[in-house]
Image (cartoon, rainbow, N blue to C red):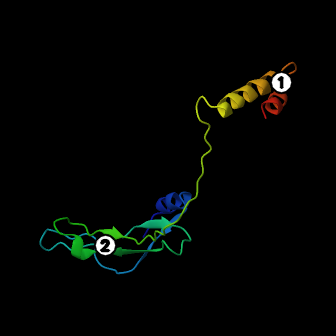
């Protein structure tokens, strides 16, 4: 049984209890007579059709007393186009750009900045 506190925490992160694909123990006892147990709490993104199942890998527990849990996450190659605008140092373009900025600052009317709205208007 999952505690209400755990559900509240999971909900606050938009997580839900994952569905297990192969029920089996996750903890393997190294003491004679003690049972193996299932500690099966994996929370994944709520409402996701791609991240809604996890698997236990008992064959990989090796010397550890816990079997690893895994999920499959699809990764698709995506081309992201970017562009950069560059002004070369010491170029005519840089000189013009700096002169334009200085002119814009000189033309700002700062004679009546009585409140935040006027300041924001000037800055914008």
Image quadrant in which you'd find residue 12: bottom right
Q: Is 46 placed above or below 24 here?
A: above
Could you say which is closer to the camera, residue 28 or residue 108?
108
* Left or right of 1, for residue 110: right
Please tell me which residue lies in front, 28 or 120.
Answer: 120
Left-right relation of 70 to 46: left
Residue 34, disc = none
Quarter holding the C terminus?
top right
Q: Which residue is drawn at 48% across and 71% down?
A: 51
Q: Find the distance from the CA under tag 2 to the CA under tag 1.
A: 72 Å
Describe residue 27's horizontal placement relative to residue 106 as left or right: left
Residue 59 x, y percent position in the rendering:
22, 76
For mark 2, what is the residue?
A: 38
Dot 1: element: loop
* Residue in the image at 49% along x and 58% along y: 5
x and y percentages locating residue 99 in the rendered image = 73, 26
The disc placed on residue 107 is 1
**Secondary element at image label 2:** loop
* Residue sitting at the far right: 112
Depth check, front residue: 24 or 4: 24
> Callout 2 environment at 10 Å: few (<14), some (14 to 19), or many (20+)?
some
Residue that lies at the very extreme toward the bottom in this rendered image? 22
Query: Picture quarter containing residue 35?
Result: bottom left
Q: Which residue is drawn at 83% across and 21% down?
A: 110
């Amino acid at each position: 049984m999952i505690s209400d506190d755990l559900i509240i925490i999971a909900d606050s992160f938009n997580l839900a209890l994952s569905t297990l694909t192969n029920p089996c123990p996750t903890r393997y006892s190294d003491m004679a007579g003690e049972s193996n147990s299932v500690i099966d709490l994996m929370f994944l993104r709520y409402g996701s059709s791609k991240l809604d199942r996890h698997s236990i890998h008992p064959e990989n527990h090796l010397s550890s007393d816990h079997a690893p849990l895994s999920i499959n996450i699809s990764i698709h190659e995506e081309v992201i186009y970017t562009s950069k605008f560059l002004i070369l140092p010491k170029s005519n373009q840089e000189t013009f750009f700096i002169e334009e900025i200085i002119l814009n600052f000189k033309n700002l009317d700062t004679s009546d900045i009585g409140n935040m709205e006027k300041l924001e208007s000037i800055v914008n």
